[in-house]
Image (cartoon, coloured by chain):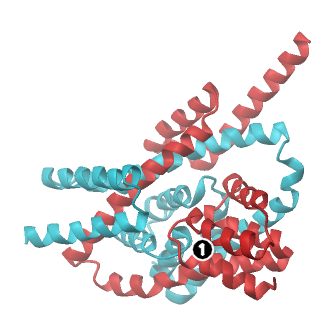
């Protein structure tokens, strides 16, 4: 599959979805089932990579592009990922002028509340996946409390989380070595 | 005074590419930086950008960056915010994809990721709180309405499996009817 065709396939998937992973069915149909240029395993790997690296979830399109066509494919994935974002400009320009209108304000407020509720729901399985033992539960809970009261920057929390779980890993590793 | 293009590039590069936990976690970090610390945009402009980015196809996060960039410096601001927030993390993902199969089973890497992801989860919950908190501060009537829409969205999305765009559409319509009934 040439890079331009790959861009069109990924753009179609990206532009017809409203959240990161919602594009997966379209990508799977086009690249795994029809074109046979991607495997299910690679599709899963792309999702895992996007969850394990900084940036939004939609960045798995770059990974998929790379799996299909190397560096050129990764660029096609990047372009497909960012192109739909430009569609926000006309409504933000229009709504920006009407932002003080009570109707616009109320609609925006309702969207914010609905988004918060769905985000809360989506965070539950993420938490179930992330909390694997007592330490990670403490990290998650402690981070939440510190963040709610704005007591620490996010980057320090992430770094502390990394050091704590690495410390636990080396402690358990050395204990296992000593006992054997 | 609006920020320079250089400052916009710097902030979106720094925060858009260094935060784990997906776009919503990054939006929470951007909220802290560009509203609380730098005061580049108002809370209303943040809400407007967030709401419209939720209605835009594709990645909500990149749409949010474009919206904020547009508010700050129109076309150049939007393009720079988009490029700054997407290029470095895309390069990282491409490199990680190249080496992922080699390190994915490495226990040290796994251990480090567990800590980072556990912290990232709390950021997602905080983002939900940031979005809903301002609407709980108004009148008692507004609080009830906020709680009603929050519960309705959870039922529609969590139990009845409506898609996010359907839930947003329903709540936006209810919000419009609410203001008309009050008027």
Circle 1 is placed at which residue position? Answer: B7
Query: Which of the 4 image quarters holds residue B79?
Result: bottom right
Kindly indicate which chain is depicted in cyan in the rendered structure. Answer: B
Query: In x, y percent, where is residue A126?
Result: 56, 45
- Quadrant containing the N terminus of chain A is bottom right
Colour representing chain A? red
**Label 1 secondary element:** helix
Position of residue A163 measured from the top left corner of the image (x, y, whole percent): 73, 36
Location of the C terminus of chain A (image quadrant): top right
Residue A17 drawn above or below residue B122 = below
Image position of B143 (left or right of B89): left
**Circle 1 marks a residue in which chain?**
B
Residue at image location 57% in from the left, 31% down from the top = A137
**Residue found farthest to the front:** A34
Where residue B61 appears, x then y in whole percent?
54, 68
Q: Is B130 left or right of A180, judged from the image as shown? A: left
């Amino acid at each position: 599959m040439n890079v331009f065709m790959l861009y069109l396939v990924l753009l179609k998937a990206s532009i017809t979805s409203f959240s990161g992973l919602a594009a997966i069915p379209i990508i799977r149909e086009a690249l795994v089932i029809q074109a046979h240029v991607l495997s299910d395993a690679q599709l899963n790997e792309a999702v895992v990579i996007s969850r394990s690296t900084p940036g939004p979830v939609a960045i798995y399109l770059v990974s998929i592009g790379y799996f299909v066509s190397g560096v050129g494919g990764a660029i096609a994935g990047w372009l497909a990922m960012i192109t739909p974002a430009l569609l926000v400009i006309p409504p933000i320009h229009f709504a920006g002028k009407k932002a003080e209108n009570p109707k616009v304000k109320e609609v925006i407020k309702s969207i914010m509340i609905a988004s918060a509720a769905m985000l809360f729901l989506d965070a539950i399985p993420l938490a179930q996946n992330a909390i694997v033992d007592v330490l990670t539960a403490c990290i998650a809970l402690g981070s939440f409390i510190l963040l709610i009261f704005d007591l620490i920057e996010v980057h320090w929390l992430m770094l502390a989380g990394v050091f704590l779980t690495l410390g636990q890993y080396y402690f358990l590793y050395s204990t296992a070595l000593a006992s054997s | 005074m609006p920020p320079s293009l250089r400052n916009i590039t710097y902030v979106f590069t720094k925060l858009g590419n260094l935060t784990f936990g997906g776009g919503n976690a990054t939006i929470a970090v951007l909220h802290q930086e560009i509203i609380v610390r730098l005061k580049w945009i108002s809370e209303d402009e943040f809400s407007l950008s967030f709401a419209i980015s939720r209605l835009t196809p594709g990645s909500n996060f990149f749409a949010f960056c474009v919206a904020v960039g547009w508010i700050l410096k129109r076309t150049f601001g939007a393009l720079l915010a988009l490029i700054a927030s997407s290029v470095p993390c895309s390069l990282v993902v491409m490199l990680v994809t190249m080496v992922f199969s080699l390190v994915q089973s490495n226990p040290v890497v796994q251990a480090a990721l567990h800590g980072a992801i556990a912290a990232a989860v709390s950021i997602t919950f905080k983002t939900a709180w940031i979005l809903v908190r301002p609407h709980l501060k108004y009148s008692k009537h507004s609080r009830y309405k906020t709680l009603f829409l929050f519960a309705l969205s959870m039922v529609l999305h969590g139990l009845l499996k409506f898609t996010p765009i359907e839930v947003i559409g329903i709540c936006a319509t209810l919000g419009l009817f609410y203001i008309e009934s009050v008027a």
